[in-house]
Image (cartoon, coloured by chain):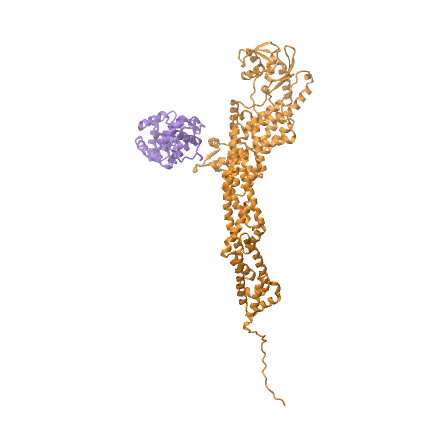
Chain colours: A orange, B purple
Amino acid sequence: MSNQKKRNFQIEAFKHRVVVDPKYAEKTWKILEHAIHEIYNHNASGLSFEELYRNAYNMVLHKFGEKLYSGLVTTMTAHLKEISKSIEAAQGDLFLEELNRKWNDHNKALQMIRDILMYMDRTYIPNSRKTPVYELGLNLWRDNIIHSGKIQSRLLSTLLELVHRERTGEVIDRGLMRNTIKMLMDLGSSVYQDDFEKPFLEVSAEFYKVESQKFIECCDCGDYLKKAEIRLNEEIERIAHYLDVKSEAKITNVVEKEMIANHMTRLVHMENSGLVNMLLDDKYEDLGRMYNLFKRVPNGLSMIRDVMTSHLRETGKQLVTDAESSKDPVEFVQRLLDERDKYDKIICQAFSNAKTFQNALNSSFEYFINLNSRSPEFISLFVDDKLRKGLKGVSEEDVEIILDKVMMLFRYLQEKDVFEKYYKQHLAKRLLSGKTVSDDAERSLIVKLKTECGYQFTSKLEGMFTDMKTSQDTMQGFYANHPELAEGPTLVVQVLTTGSWPTQPTITCNLPTEMAALCEKFRSHYLGTHTGRRLSWQTNMGTADIKATFGKGQKHELNVSTYQMCVLMLFNNADRLSYKEIEQATEIPASDLKRCLQSMACVKGKNVLRKEPMSKDIGTDDAFFVNDKFTSKFYKVKIGTVVAQKESEPEKLETRQRVEEDRKPQIEAAIVRIMKSRRVLDHNNVIAEVTKQLQSRFLANPTEIKKRIESLIEREFLERDSDDRKLYRYLA
Amino acid sequence: MPPRASKRKSAPPNSSSVTSSDGRSVSNKAKTKGMDKIDRLFNTYANSSLGVIDPEGIEALCSDLGVDYTDVRILMLAWKLKAEKQGYFTQDEWQTGLKALGVDSLTKLKKALPELEKEVEEPSNYEDFYIYAFQYCLTEEKQKSVDIESICELLNLVLGVQFRPQVDSLVEYLKVQNDYKVINADQWINFLRFCKEQISFPDLENYDATQAWPLILDNFVEWMREKQS
């Protein structure tokens, strides 16, 4: 039998031993506190990391994190206060060194402490939202050292003093600076900014304000800019060596503002050394420096550009309106080209070929080239000169370069149709006198003009070339068909299609009988193969080579105009001829005849005729003889002149009138084109559209456009809208 | 008798009347009577061989109305009659016009003149009258413009009362300038617009030459400004 006792099973929760030693926390803390002291006293080597870590761990585990943390704060603060005193005590230059040394110490200590207290860092601190150990250490440093009353201002003034010394040329301990600055940066960007950067920028601004004022009083523009550049580079280098890279933009702004922006206007306009002088003297380096410095400040480049533009316009205006330079068209154009080359080079070398500067150059040229209404004529004369002789012996590439430069000037012209008219005249003379230096160059220019202005611009010019070629073939055919004429005078005929060549009036002139007969033969030959065409001899445009024998037997070959030939041939049958007799025989109009006789009787070296009386002018009662005493060192003597020349006033007026007349139908065609497509359009838009359409040929005058509109209204192509007077309607 | 061809296709002026087979106007008695009176009045002044009132007739009519030959009211009458050719009134025009005026005798016509003036001055009619005045001067076929001298007189006549200062200056200018020897319809209508649009006179401050005014007015304004400076 057994005694059955009922036993209750109780399962109890496992309880670990709670050490409720009230002194436990205090004891453990004391250990740690001691350790911190030792660490700060550089006695860390005697400590056991593992033990300390365990202690800290236990404290946190046993819920004494609070005590640990606040203990840490107190202890560290106390030490920092000690450190602060020792830093304050440092004299002079040692201040910064001491600060640095103590900072390094503190960092090392902080790391060790953090390692020891790592468990707290990971558990208690996040839970209670307290500042982590390392950051705490930095903040305490900041609050107790950097922001301590005695240290804060001293630190700042020391740093600024060093920077100032360096700016004035002294060598400073950059390493020390770098460390100190890094310390500030580590303490937080607001510390760096508030405790150093802001004051630094202010002081720098003051420094540069003073310095720039000093420089500007004593330096010329180029030197000033050199100094400014040096200072700027210095500051950039300073940043790289010991300041926060984020400060670079800020300090460079300061320098730019104080040294450049504030004195920009004065620099640019400085007498004898400012921008204009640099431009005039081609000071590429100075200009480049100015460009680079001014690029950094607002409106810097636009100031340079504006001054350059107004200077260019002024000089350009003087160039084109100067009466002297207008006397020689070739010189005139050459000076324009030289000016353009000069500025091209400046922009390329000093202004980094910036597009805005190129545009300023172009707009300036466009402005002043058109101030002289003879520019189109002169450019054509320049080209004429080059194609006659100027390009002789020049290589093909150089020819292209010159022609391209001329095209640049051409592009600036507003009245391109005037250029076309003159170019046609000059080209005609060149072709007909056979005086062109290079056929390839001629054609190359035509191609360039075609690319620029379109097919219509050059179709007639090309027609002229075709005529020349065709005429050659015609002449060959003529002589092939008439072998019997090979013995007589050689005839060279150029058959010109009326539409392509500049219009010339047909003038009367009686050819000598031998020539007349020959010309007739040619006419019948030509018309035989080209029925339905009409030929009229342009006696005012021809030339002749005739052999002459003078009184003492001297023989010469004379190159003369057709008129001159007619006159000279008369003397084969008479020794003396009066003006009236010559006039009657040749039927050449009076003004042309007078000029013709003058060129043969009154010009030294070409006086194949003798005149009585010996006056310079041709009178209607004068008598003419062959000049038996004529001499010339050349066998071939050129008397005829069919060279293109600058027009006389009346000729100029006539050409301009013809240009104006030609413009009228062009304007009307443009108006009709626009109105046909738009149907209804208001006045201002019509003017704008018409001007735009005609831009590539000439600048249309709004008054002239208005006249044409009214003419079209009268002829019932357009009407005004009945309600809105400003509108025009197209009438189909 | 076979019915006569009712419409003759020749150039104006020419008389044409709708006739019935017996050659009399077809309408009721009162109308016929009224028309008769109008016709009789017409015949008083008409040139019997031409069948229209010619300049002589008009002169006589004016004298009877107590109005000068060159008075603007005659022009207004012509407008009312829609007379096509200057100096002539056809029978048709006469009939239509007098009927529209509601008159059939000389006295009534005389009384109707002031009313006619008012009618013309109504804004809706005035422009029409103004344009008519110009076209009335185009006496030759294919004529499109009127010589300066006539234009000056016409301006005086038509615009003189309402726009005296503008007309005086404009007339002076037209006589002095020599860009234009004649004025066309477009320029004519723009004279009226110029006056109507209250371009401040004589300073012409609010005249804008960039607007679509005819060139002649641009030149006129420039001339005025130069005169004043």
Residue A702 in the image: state x and y as whole percent.
48, 33
Q: How many marks?
A: 0
- Vertical placement of A268 versus B45: above or below? below
- Vertical placement of A484 versus B56: above or below? above
Left or right, A442 with respect to A615, comes to right
Is A120 or A77 nearer to us in this picture?
Answer: A77
Left or right, B159 with respect to A222, comes to left
The image quarter in which residue A10 lies: bottom right
Residue A137 in the image: state x and y as whole percent.
55, 60
Residue A422 in the image: state x and y as whole percent.
56, 26
Does any portion of residue A402 appear in the rendered image? yes
The image quarter in which residue B131 lies: top left
Looking at the rendered image, the quarter that the N terminus of chain A falls into is bottom right
Left or right, A723 with respect to A521, comes to left
Is A331 or A229 nearer to us in this picture?
Answer: A229
Residue A276 in the image: state x and y as whole percent.
53, 34
Left or right, B56 with respect to A680, comes to left
Does any portion of residue B23 appear in the rendered image? no
Is B64 or A390 nearer to us in this picture?
Answer: A390
Is B36 or A100 nearer to us in this picture?
Answer: A100
The image quarter in which residue B103 lies: top left
Furthest-top residue in view?
A: A575
